Image: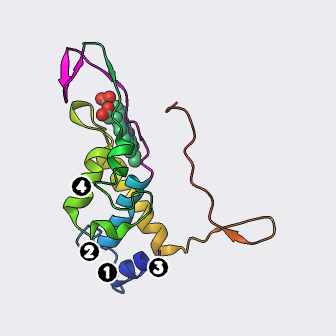
Amino acid sequence: QEKAHKEIISVIRPNRLLIIADKDSLPYVFSLVTEVMRWNSAVPLGVPHVLSQDDVYEGWDLPKNTLVMPNIWHMFHDPEVYDDPMSFIPERYNGDDLEMRKITDLAFGFGRRACPGFYFAEGTLYAIVLTVLTCCEVLPELDDEGKSFIPNVIYTPGGIR
Ligand code: HEM
């Protein structure tokens, strides 16, 4: 948070009403949002699809009407691709746009039925994170005795309703 905040402050100039928020000017902030999408992706098993014709995938015969679900979770946590995949490490992209694209190209699904809300969702996410990090300090939750703690991050079961 501190690193992101410093980066934002460094691009804001007094009396300027607009800041250009892109991966070149704010590489760490964009890496941070990308890492959220990798670390606990919003749609870890994508959306199920049914094959409209027979297909073969990596030697597997898949007849028409087979239900297929992409394991996006594994794509993002494959230790052969991502070192220490369970840890939240925005630095892993090195601010590199191509490395970040590898995440967003998968997080929103693939092919003809990929998420049509991609640009809207991505832009909104960056705008919210940027605004919060510029204006606020996000602090850990407090327990009943007033001691701070980081809540456990868990997925809740169920689909989108
Ligand atoms: C972080 C936010 C979002 C993520 C991670 C996300 C992810 C996804 C994924 C993985 C799919 C399935 C693609 C596939 O079948 O391969 C999908 C489909 C879809 N998304 Fe999103 N989505 C997000 C936000 C949105 C928003 C904001 C909208 C609308 C404004 C939206 C509208 C849709 C629709 C309509 C489909 C179905 C497309 C189809 O089956 O043809 N999504 N999304």
* The residue carrying mark 1 has its beta carbon less than 8 Å from ligand 1: no
Q: Between disc 2 and disc 3, whose residue precedes?
A: 3
Report how far apart the C-alphas of labels 4 and 2 lie in the structure: 17 Å
**Residue 112 spot, x, y in % from top left:** 21, 31
Q: Between disc 2 and disc 1, whose residue precedes?
A: 1
Report how far apart the C-alphas of labels 2 and 3 lie in the structure: 17 Å
The residue singled out by tag 4 in the image is 101
Asked if the stretch drawn in magenta spans residue 94, the answer is no
Name the residue nearer the viewer: 109 or 128.
Answer: 109
Q: Which residue is most to the right?
A: 145
Mark 1 Cα-neighbour bin, 10 Å: few <14, some 14–19, many ≥20: few
Q: Do the residues labelled 2 and 1 touch (CB within 8 Å)?
A: yes
Identify the image's colour scheme: rainbow, by chain, secondary structure or one colour: rainbow
The residue singled out by tag 2 in the image is 25
Report how far apart the C-alphas of labels 4 and 1 lie in the structure: 23 Å
**Amino acid type of the residue that numbered disc 2 sits on in the rendered structure:** Ser
Q: Between disc 3 and disc 4, whose residue precedes?
A: 3
Q: Do the residues labelled 4 and 2 touch (CB within 8 Å)?
A: no
Q: Do the residues labelled 3 and 1 touch (CB within 8 Å)?
A: no
Identify the image quadrant of residue 71: top left
Q: Are marks 3 and 4 in contact (CB under 8 Å)?
A: no
The residue singled out by tag 3 in the image is 2
Q: Residues in magenta?
A: 40-62
**Residue 69 spot, x, y in % from top left:** 35, 29
Foreground label between 3 and 1 = 3
Q: Is mark 1 on a helix, strand or loop?
A: helix
Question: Residue, x 25% and y 13% (percent of image)?
Answer: 63
